[in-house]
Image (tube, rainbow, N blue to C red):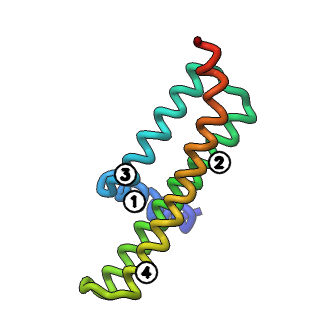
């Protein structure tokens, strides 16, 4: 159990780091909180919650991995390097793909509720 608690402590430290220091993660977290508030306001279904939570976890998880990749690359070299740029661009692209799909899912889930208001 002690090993588990230590591992959990490391993970929480990493989470607190990205919340405090990574602007893009803060943006994703803000969007997630906004979507959750909208979900409560509109009373979305359990299935819709599952989809929203899964895509949100994917976006924020990929953002955390992207941050880790960037830090690893910066440890290797802080100078401009074509290979490192490519690695960073690809990992950022993965976040962008998931964020685009998250927006599409958000529109698909919330548009019918918004349309009912009018």
Percent coordinates x, y for residue 11 in the rendering: 47, 61
Labels 2 & 1 near each other (Cβ < 8 A) = no
Give the number of the disc on residue 13: 1
Instruction: Measure the alpha-carbon separation of dots 3 and 4.
Output: 25 Å
Q: Which of marks 2 and 4 is nearer the N terminus?
A: 2
Which of the marked residues, 2 or 1, is nearer the chain's N terminus?
1
x%, y% of residue 4? 57, 64
| Mark 3 and mark 2: Cα distance apart in space | 19 Å
**Nearest-to-viewer mark from 3 and 4:** 4
Q: Residues within 10 Å of mark 1 (few under 14, many from 20)?
A: few
Q: What is the number of the mark on residue 54?
A: 2
Compute the Cα span from label 3 to label 1: 10 Å
Do residues under tags 3 and 4 come within 8 Å of each other at their CB atoms? no
Q: Name the residue under label 4.
A: 86
Quick one: which residue is furthest to the left in this view? 79
State the residue at coordinates (55%, 68%).
3
Between 84 and 49, the residue placed more toward the observer is 84
**Mark number displayed over residue 19:** 3
Which residue is at a point 55% across and 43% down the rendered structure image?
103
**Quadrant in the picture for residue 40:** top right
- Mark number displayed over residue 87: none
Crowding at mark 4 (Cα within 10 Å: few <14, some 14-19, many 20+): few
Q: Is mark 3 on a helix, strand or loop?
A: helix
């Amino acid at each position: 159990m002690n090993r588990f608690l230590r591992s959990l402590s490391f993970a929480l430290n990493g989470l607190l780091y990205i919340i405090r220091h990574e602007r893009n993660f803060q943006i994703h977290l803000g969007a997630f909180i906004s979507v959750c508030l909208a979900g409560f306001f509109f009373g979305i279904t359990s299935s819709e919650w599952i989809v929203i939570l899964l895509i949100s976890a994917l976006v924020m998880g990929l953002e955390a991995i992207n941050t880790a990749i960037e830090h690893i690359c910066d440890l290797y070299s802080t100078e401009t390097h074509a290979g490192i740029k490519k690695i960073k661009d690809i990992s950022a692209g993965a976040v962008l793909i998931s964020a685009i799909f998250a927006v599409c899912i958000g529109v698909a889930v919330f548009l019918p509720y918004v349309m009912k208001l009018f």
